[in-house]
Amino acid sequence: RLGRLQNFDPNAERWEVDVRGEGSGAKRLKEANLRPAPKPMVPPGLAVAELKEKGNTCFKASELEEAVAYYSAALDLLQDSEFRGSKSEDSGAARPAEADDPKYIAVLLNNRAQCFIMLCREIHGEDSAIGQEARRYAMRANMDAAKAIELDAANGKAYYRRGCAVLGMAPSASRAKEAIHCLETALSGRASGSQDTGIVLPNAMRHEVSNLLDYAKRRLDACTEAAVPDVEQCRENCRQQ
């Protein structure tokens, strides 16, 4: 199983490892029992729908890197120049029907964005500062979610995931405001589609989105407070000048 190294105990000569999967928790392993994660391999010849299904299966099994690989392969296949026409001149391969369905492509981007968000959270953990690797995953999630919104402006999940992604970057007031906008837009949706905006958001997600919106507002307050200069410190600086 895949896990992420946390702390090393020099006395016991063991690493504390957070193991993925429900009920797995943390384990203490000797360095000799650790090995690098294998690079995800996508078998050739799979259709877009098959790649998407395998990506979903990997995601449910917490195999996030494998899920990303399958979703990426499906997106690459849809964007392949070979399918820009109705058929490839060289191979005669038919253009995938999914290539003409923006909502289908948006779902793939949305799914991959969720994988990136979960990887970002896994790396970030309980750390107070957001590290470079976590920010990198957050930026990838943001790009995927933004593209999904372009393709399907009624996709409430995409607005939610973009809000998640923006909050996974280095804190700033502008990013907090952007996250609040995305999350409020998501919450404007309804399970059957909002009458005003047409945005669709499953009822089961509303509580999760609301909680994140509250966090985004607290993040904005913290960034705003940090930007306000301390009056006494300013006076002291003036006296020193």
Image: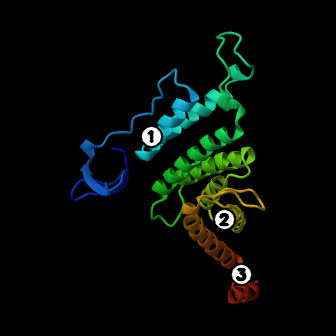
Q: At 57% across and 35% down in the image, what residue appears?
A: 72
Judge depth for marks 3 and 1 and give the one in front: 1
In the rendered view, tell whether residue 229 sits above or below residue 64: below
Determine which residue is flagged by label 1.
57
Look at label 3 and name its amino acid: Pro
Describe the element under mark 1 as helix, strand or loop.
helix
Q: Earlier in the sequence, mark 3 or mark 1?
A: 1
User: From the viewer's perspective, is 94 left or right of 22?
Assistant: right
Note whether residue 85 is visible.
yes
Describe the element under mark 2 as helix, strand or loop.
helix
Q: At 23% across and 53% down in the image, what residue appears?
A: 13
Of residues 143 and 86, the one nearer the viewer is: 86
**Label 2, residues with CA under 10 Å away: few <14, some 14-19, many ≥20:** many
Q: Quadrant of residue 190?
A: bottom right
The N terminus lies in quadrant? top left
Determine which residue is flagged by label 2.
187
**Label 1, residues with CA under 10 Å away: few <14, some 14-19, many ≥20:** some
Residue 52, x across and y down, in percent = 54, 36
**Distance CA(mark 1)–CA(mark 2):** 28 Å
The reply to whether dot 2 and dot 3 touch (C-beta < 8 Å) is no
The reply to whether dot 1 and dot 2 touch (C-beta < 8 Å) is no
Look at label 1 and name its amino acid: Thr
Name, please, the residue furthest toward the right: 196
Q: At 64% across and 11% down in the image, what residue appears?
A: 91
Residue 156, x across and y down, in percent = 66, 56
Note whether residue 65 is visible.
no
Look at label 2 and name its amino acid: Leu
Residue 172, x across and y down, in percent = 67, 66
Describe the element under mark 3 as helix, strand or loop.
loop
Determine which residue is flagged by label 3.
229
Residue 62, x across and y down, in percent = 42, 47
Q: Quadrant of residue 130?
A: bottom right
